[in-house]
Amino acid sequence: MNENPSIDFVIIWVDGSDPEWLAQKAEYAPPSHSDSRPERYRDWGLLPYWFRGVEKFAPWVNRIHFVTWGHIPEWLSTSHPKLNIVRHEDYIPEKYLPTFSSHTIELNLHRIKGLSENFVFFNDDTFVTAPVSKEDFFKNGLPCDSAVLNVHCYAPSLPIQMIAINDTGLINEHFDIKRTIKAAPLNWLSPLYGKLLMRTFPLMFCPRFPGFYQPHLPSSLKISTIEEVWKAEPEALDRTCMNKFRSAYDVNQWLFREWQLAGNRFVPRSAGVGRTFYPDRDGKDEFVRAAEVISKQKKKLICINDCKLTEEEFEEYKTRIISAFESILPDKSGFEE
């Protein structure tokens, strides 16, 4: 087996200020939906640093697939040999279009023409902030990940928790928790997981998978896994993709990652490879902590969730985060005009 096959990166992005996109979104939008919050589409001006981080810290990447509704940043060099601009209509089946649901965009990634079997999926709030190797994402053709059990606690104000429950429900239709852990106990009890093992220990005796810990970091995925899930659960995925906007009844791309975990088709990786910042949960000082982690390159990967902010707060934290990125990535990348 080729130990170091080609690895592509995929990033999905939306320009929430595009008037044409906003007009189309308004045409299809119901009176209220889970994607109506302004922070879902607010531009922090960080996309150039995503490309700079990839070029500097992951120069080995085979190709970057930039998925967009149709808008393209003015500064982006579309002629870069590693860059593939992918519009929704290029890969998403016509019956699902137009879509304003990240779930539909993500569930169909395997249809991208020219995508490598092994790829890493990035949301546009996840970044590479220190040198990474191929082995941080794949080893011997298997995704690198942390298998940690979790309990998802639903509240109407947190529809993402219900989506996580939906994902886990499908996993339990196809995998048995006891057989999975017994078949490869070191996958689930690896010392690499550190204190996160305290989540798994009491939950591993549940009759079914109670849920999976989601680090909200870039996900190592395989086209063959996604195809397998579509074959096994076509109705659930099709139903999700028919929704123009995200719904609490959906499944999402976490299902692909969890399928790999439940099938023991992964290599254990330290959960400390990255960190996610949750200002909505842990307070707005998370932006300050994120800036410090970036500037001191304490983690290889980070995710910065957005939250409700006043205009003054937004400008303050945006300036702080951009300054931190500038301190480690001051030079334009080859992806910038």
Image (cartoon, rainbow, N blue to C red):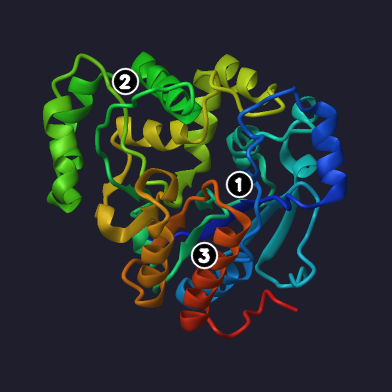
User: Whole-percent x and y of residue 336?
Assistant: 70, 76
- Which disc, if any, is residue 317? 3
Q: CA separation, marks 1 and 3?
A: 13 Å
Task: For residue 59, say whether it is visible.
Answer: no
**What amino acid is found at the position of numbered circle 1 in the picture?**
Glu
User: Which tag, 1 or 2, sits closer to the chain's start?
Assistant: 1
Task: For residue 77, say whether it is visible.
Answer: yes
- Secondary structure beneath disc 2? loop
- Secondary structure beneath disc 3? helix
Instruction: Locate residue 271 relative to residue 336 in the image: left or right.
Output: left
Which residue is at the front of the view, 291 or 64? 291
Q: Which residue is mark 1?
A: 39
Q: CA separation, marks 1 and 2?
A: 36 Å
**What amino acid is found at the position of numbered circle 2 in the picture?**
Phe
Q: Are marks 3 and 2 in contact (CB under 8 Å)?
A: no
Which residue is at the front of the view, 324 or 139? 324
User: Which tag, 3 or 2, sits closer to the chain's start?
Assistant: 2
> Quadrant location of residue 295?
bottom left
> Quadrant location of residue 105?
top right
Instruction: Locate residue 306 relative to residue 170 in the image: left or right.
Output: right
User: Which tag, 1 or 3, sits closer to the chain's start?
Assistant: 1
Mark in the foreground, 3 or 2: 3
Q: Which residue is mark 2?
A: 175
